[in-house]
Amino acid sequence: MRLRTFLPSSITARIVAIGFVLALTQLLVAEVVAEGGATGHAWFHVLFFALPALAGAAGIMVLWPNAGLASRIPVIGLLALAAAQLIESVGAMGFDADNDARVRGIVVLHDLGLGLSAIGMIAAILGLAVGIGIASWRLRGRRAWLGLAATLVGLAGGLVLVLTLTGMSPLWG
């Protein structure tokens, strides 16, 4: 078998590939353009959020290429998170070497990325939960109910996590 038979050729796959190229390019640009702590800040958004989200999207597409909505919805959610983090990473290069003062106009992209990241995290969590839910309905018997329970627990826990990360959690101040 050839490798090409395992790789999806959809527009979504092309978007994921472009996302990987942009993320790796962003690492190089941050190394050249950003100063001191701002470099690490820009790298943080790429290495710990954008690349893992893109890797998850690629993994879902390769492992379950014909799963329909069960694979498409999580991939779109993960792409939304990756895009928001790449925008935030570009904006992170606008901080000074100590990473505490705004010295370049591109720092407004960091603020934009912050808002989009909350939406991207919710999209990724909802996408994964809905994908698991759709896949679980295809199962039979007790496994379907376990899949539904896992979907609901993952959805509730994920939303609490996002609300906590964005400072909007009603559970604690």
Image (cartoon, grey):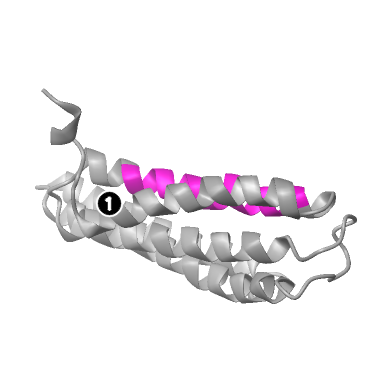
Task: Report whether 19 appears left or right of 103.
Answer: left
**In the rendered image, which quarter contains the C terminus?**
bottom right
Residue at the image position 71 percent from the left and 62 percent from the top: 92
Q: Quadrant of residue 171?
A: bottom right
Q: Answer whether residue 156 is magenta in the image.
A: no
Q: Quadrant of residue 42?
A: bottom right
Residue at the image position 39 percent from the left and 53 percent from the top: 18
The range drawn in magenta is 39-58
Q: Answer whether residue 42 is magenta in the image.
A: yes
Vertically, is 2 above or below 108? above
Name which residue type carries label 1.
Answer: Ala
Instruction: Name the dominant secondary structure of the magenta segment.
Output: helix
Residue sticking out furthest to the top: 1
Tally the marks.
1
Q: Which residue matches tag 1?
A: 13
Task: Report whether 110 appears left or right of 152.
Answer: right
The answer to which of 33 and 48 lies nearer the viewer is 33
* Position in image of residue 47 (x %, y %): 59, 45
Q: Would residue 18 be visible to someone looking at this image?
A: yes
Q: Would residue 129 be visible to someone looking at this image?
A: no
* Position in image of residue 45 (x %, y %): 62, 54
